[in-house]
């Protein structure tokens, strides 16, 4: 129970969330959603995973999110598989369906925008409205993005919930934070830091969070973190053919020096990866919320860039 509470506090701090509340919103997929205030019982931690801190979102849940600075509430609908989705998807893919899995962290999940407004849902609509792209085909874009996930957790999530859908294409969006984040390494450091304080206030967790990140970067450096991530890319590409996976990132000219160096290191250390850094910077375009996550316009920008890029890949799949 203590681990769940600690995890919850850290997640809230990581996304700078003022508060989450769940309530009955509407009937979803012919079943009443779970309605409850967010607490340690509303996330599933270490559900038979090899990772100590791994968590998943519960299915048939509706989450309403509105930190103090967010003008409009964001409503996330979790489907029968615990994915931030409008629809449920059959496991067995029909012959007339082209299926895409999207992977990533909060930028793919769609933090602070309604489910139907995140880039993965917009991409699904755009593809299905493009009747000349793949005639007589229906596109399914299944979103496995989860806020806070790092490379190992994204791979774990795909293994547990993604590969069974037998996708034709996998699209992984790198938000820049994925170059550095490692949940299993920094969570023990945070817990060790927090135990020295009698006051367990959010400010203490925030201070320990930053201290842990600095300590890891100092200890391992970019090279060390890249090597750890590459071990999980090895696992990922044992499940997904190189030709079926495309990684997207923001325009390299817009990256800060640290992010640029990390990006270069990933490309050099894993050269077989298809990494298209062609998404316009939502930061430079000022299409972000106060905390730096893409707003509705930012998700449109991400969708447009990915759509234009994968059109050529999909034509090969279609014919």
Image: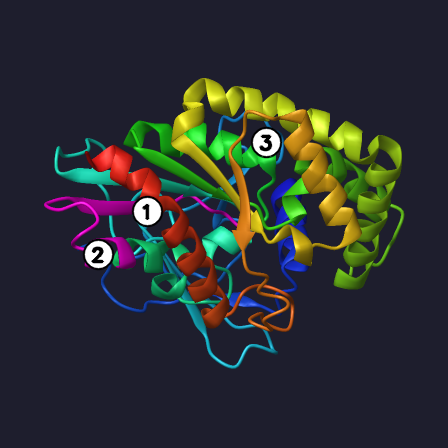
CA gap, disc 2 and disc 3: 34 Å
Q: Which mark, by number, is residue 130?
A: 2
Q: Position of residue 160 (x, y in %)?
A: 42, 29
Residue 180 visible here: no
Image position of 1 with respect to 48: above or below: below
Residues rendered magenta in the picture:
126-147
> Can you name the residue that lies furthest to the bottom here?
71
Mark before the other along the chain sequence, 2 or 1: 2
Q: Residues within 10 Å of mark 3 (few under 14, many from 20)?
A: many
Name the quarter where the C terminus is drawn: top left
> Can you name the residue that lies furthest to the left here?
136
The one nearer the camera, 146 or 56, is 146
Q: Residues within 10 Å of mark 2 (few under 14, many from 20)?
A: few
Tag 3, which secondary structure? Answer: helix
Report if the CB atoms under discs 2 and 1 are less than 8 Å apart. yes
Q: Residues within 10 Å of mark 1 (few under 14, many from 20)?
A: some
Q: Position of residue 161 (x, y in %)?
A: 38, 33
> Which residue does the numbered mark 3 point to in the structure image?
152
């Amino acid at each position: 129970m203590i681990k769940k509470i600690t995890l919850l506090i850290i997640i809230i701090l990581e996304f700078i969330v003022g508060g989450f509340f769940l309530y009955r919103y509407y009937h979803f997929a012919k079943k009443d959603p779970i309605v409850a205030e967010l607490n340690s019982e509303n996330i599933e931690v270490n559900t038979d995973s090899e990772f100590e801190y791994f968590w998943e979102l519960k299915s048939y849940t509706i989450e309403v999110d509105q930190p103090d600075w967010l003008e409009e509430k964001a409503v996330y609908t979790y489907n029968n598989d615990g994915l931030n989705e409008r629809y449920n998807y059959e496991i067995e893919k029909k012959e007339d369906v082209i299926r895409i899995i999207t992977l990533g962290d909060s930028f793919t999940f769609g933090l602070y925008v309604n489910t139907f407004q995140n880039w993965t849902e917009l991409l699904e609509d755009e593809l299905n409205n493009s009747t000349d792209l793949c005639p007589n085909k229906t596109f399914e874009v299944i979103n496995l993005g989860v806020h806070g996930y790092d490379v190992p957790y994204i791979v774990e999530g795909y293994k547990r919930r993604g590969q069974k859908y037998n996708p034709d294409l996998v699209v992984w969006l790198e938000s820049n934070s994925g170059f550095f984040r490692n949940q299993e390494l920094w969570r023990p450091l945070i817990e060790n830091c927090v135990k020295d304080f009698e006051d367990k206030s959010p400010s203490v967790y925030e201070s320990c969070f930053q201290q842990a990140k600095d300590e890891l970067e100092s200890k391992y450096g970019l090279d060390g973190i890249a090597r750890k991530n590459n071990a999980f890319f090895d696992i990922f590409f044992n499940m997904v053919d190189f030709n079926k996976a495309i990684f997207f990132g923001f325009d390299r000219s817009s990256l800060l020096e640290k992010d640029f160096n990390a990006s270069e290191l990933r490309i050099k250390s894993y050269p077989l990866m298809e990494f298209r850094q062609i998404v316009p910077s939502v930061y430079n375009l000022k299409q972000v919320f106060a905390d730096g996550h893409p707003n509705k316009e930012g998700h449109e920008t991400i969708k447009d860039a990915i759509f234009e890029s994968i059109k050529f890949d999909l034509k090969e799949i279609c014919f």
